[in-house]
């Protein structure tokens, strides 16, 4: 199983930060790598929301269907997908803190775990380490873009 963990501090309160990170409709405007995002379910974003995201990955368009599998406003959520013979689960946790200047801030922790499901994916697992650094770079850029939006708006 491959695992990527990232953290960053956002100079905005948890509710605001959570709102920005889960605003799927605005994601293509906020995150440069996302070309298009289609909601596949009706109603407000929450547990059970499914969506199709098209982004540029390694200089090519890639489209994945994902589902929000956990959702606790202001505190955290999880997104899962199955693609390329693997199961992906990303968990975001939002923790409040008070900055040294006295303002409200949020620590965002993101953990992505990948588990091979098919024989071919299991066979390729030793090579998955080669994908970790590029994936971490993409995820870091996404989180930085969302941080900027939460701090600006």
Image (tube, rainbow, N blue to C red):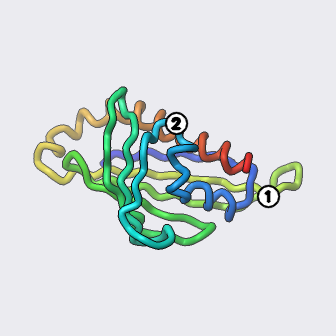
Give residue 17's position: percent from left, percent from top: 65, 57
Element carrying mark 2: loop
Residue 146 percent across, percent down from the top left: 60, 46
Residue nearer the viewer, 95 or 11: 11
Q: Nearer the viewer, residue 117 or 73?
A: 73
Q: Residues within 10 Å of mark 1 (few under 14, many from 20)?
A: some
Residue plotted at (65% across, 61% down): 95
Residue displayed at 12% across by 43% down: 120
Q: Which residue is mark 1?
A: 104
Residue 133 numbered tag: none
Residue 75 in the image: x percent, y percent?
60, 67
Q: Quadrant of residue 61?
A: top left
Count of residue discs: 2
What residue appears at the point 25 percent right and 49 percent down from the top-left corner? 83
Q: CA distance from mark 1 to mark 2?
A: 27 Å
For this orientation, the residue located farthest to the top is 59
Q: Is residue 153 left or right of residue 34?
A: right
Residue at far right of view: 101
Look at the numbered disc 1 and give the secondary structure of its residue: strand
For the residues carrying marks 1 and 2, which lies nearer the camera in this image?
Answer: 2
Describe residue 85's horizontal placement relative to residue 130 as left or right.
left
- Residue 97: name its quadrant: bottom right
Residue 32: which numbered mark, if any? 2
Give neighbour class at mark 2: few <14, some 14-19, many 20+ (Cα, 10 Å).
Answer: few
Q: Residue at x 48, y 70 (%)?
A: 46
Q: Earlier in the sequence, mark 1 or mark 2?
A: 2
The spot of residue 45 in percent (x, y) is 49, 67
**Residues at circles 1 and 2 in contact by the CB criterion of under 8 Å:** no
Extreme-left residue of the structure: 119
107 lies above or below 45: above
């Amino acid at each position: 199983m491959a695992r990527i963990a990232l953290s960053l501090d956002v100079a905005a309160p948890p509710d605001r930060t959570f709102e920005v990170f889960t605003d799927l409709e605005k994601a293509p405007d906020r995150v440069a790598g996302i070309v298009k995002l289609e909601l596949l379910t009706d109603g407000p974003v929450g547990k059970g929301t499914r969506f199709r995201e098209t982004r540029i990955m390694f200089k090519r368009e890639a489209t994945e269907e994902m589902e929000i599998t956990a959702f606790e406003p202001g505190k955290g959520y999880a997104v899962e997908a199955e693609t390329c013979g693997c199961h992906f689960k990303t968990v975001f946790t939002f923790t409040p803190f008070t900055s040294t200047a006295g303002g409200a801030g949020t620590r965002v922790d993101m953990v992505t775990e990948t588990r091979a499901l098919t024989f071919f994916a299991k066979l390729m697992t030793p090579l998955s380490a080669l994908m970790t650094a590029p994936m971490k770079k993409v995820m870091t850029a996404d989180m930085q873009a969302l941080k900027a939006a939460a701090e600006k708006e």
